Amino acid sequence: MKKNFAMTAVFSLFMLFARSAAAQPFNLPLQLDYTLIKKVLVTQLYKAAGNTVELLNDKRGCSYLKLSNPEVSGQSGQIRLLNNIQAQFGTNFGGQCVTLLQWGGVLETLQSPTINADHTILSLPITKVTAYDQQNRPLTIDKLQDLIKRYAEPKLAAVKVDLKESRPDIEHTLAKYLPKQHEAEVGKMLDTLRFASAEAKDDGVAIGFSFDAPAKLAATKPAAALTEAEQKQWQSAWQEWDTFFSKAIEQASGDTQSAELRDTLTEILLESRSAFQAGLKDRDANAADPVRVFFTDTWERLAPQLRTLAKQLPEVQGLRYMTFIAATDLIYELESRGAPFGLEISSDGLRRLARMLIAGKQEAAVN
């Protein structure tokens, strides 16, 4: 999927359905699966064949220190990282490498997920290091323990996840779809993004993600169905979104090589066209709202596949998918509690959105 699609979609929803009001903070529980944490490690550190990192090599092959095959899990509120470790010490004698010591085992580190002071970076400082041989006996070789401390610990502790990497892309993309009078509001909202906490759980790292958004407003009045002229203008405005999502489907299919996901996304796009068209027209007030039914049914089908996809993708892409999933879950929760954003997943909400998009295109054409 386009690299900024997930979070762009989230904030597009927030802002396009919102009205001006005093801001209030909202919290979003973001779960980083340990599969994603492992991909971060592999991408940043274990770059050699077989997920290996060479921490020390004397260039003659006589002495080296290597880590490989990292496994990540949670233990007692910390991240538990297991590595295969191989060490050899030798000396050059008469042009030949003479091995003095060869050792192999497992290196275990406990690392505490930590958010930096700027609330943008997740780091993994080490709290405990233990090495075991193949018989599960603790390492007692002082020289090797010293090398682990000098070379392995700093490398493992230096791994970081930039949680706010996509902010410029979000702002740039939102500018294409929002009327200019919302630009300042969007910028202020994005400026409040903060990752306040991180906690290692059994199945992943729980990130406390928060932002300030428009506060709850009085109930909005029903929106009239679009006129014939507005329908034509909407078709033009919607065509850009339709193209955007079509490209996103292609990218998502390429990311995961999943025919099932591609087919699901294509079906959703086709269904959105008919559901939205029905929501914009006059309808039976006693019948189920086609827009609300579409969003509810769609998310029940799509969320499980996106969670699976997030675990298969490289680190940054996976993070964006997980953010999208968490934010969409929050949208439904907040909307069901009384729409504190002014968010309304309904035909009335879509009609207001359509008129906003039409006005935005007209304003852009004039300027």
Image: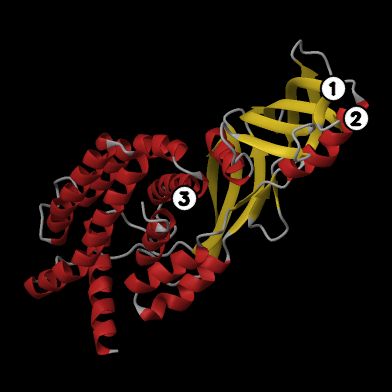
**Residue at numbered disc 1:** 101
Distance from disc 1 to disc 2, alpha carbons, whole Å, reads 10 Å
- Going from N to C along the chain, the mark reached first, 3 or 2, is 2
Give residue 320's mark: 3
**Residue 328 visible, this angle:** yes
Indicate which disc residue 206 carries. none
Q: In this view of the protein, which residue sits in the foreground, 185 or 314?
A: 314
The residue type indicated by label 1 comes to Leu
| Among the 4 quarters of the image, the one containing residue 255 | top left
- Image position of 186 (left or right of 70): left
The answer to whether the residue labelled 1 contacts the one labelled 2, judged by CB atoms less than 8 Å apart, is: yes
Tell me how far mark 3 sits from mark 2, CA to CA. 43 Å
- The residue nearer to you, when weighing 355 against 51, is 51
**Mark 3 near mark 2, Cβ–Cβ under 8 Å?**
no
Q: Amino acid at mark 2?
A: Lys
Residue at label 2? 143
Q: Can you give x and y, in whole percent of width and height, for residue 277 in the image?
A: 13, 57
Image marks 3 and 1: residues in contact by CB distance under 8 Å: no
Quadrant of residue 70 within the rendered picture: top right
What is the residue that sits farthest to the bottom in this orientation? 367
Disc on the earlier residue, 3 or 1: 1
Task: Decide: few, some or many residues near mark 3? Use Cα within 10 Å; few <14, some 14-19, many ≥20.
Answer: many
Q: Is residue 243 above or below residue 49?
A: below
**Type of amino acid under label 3:** Arg
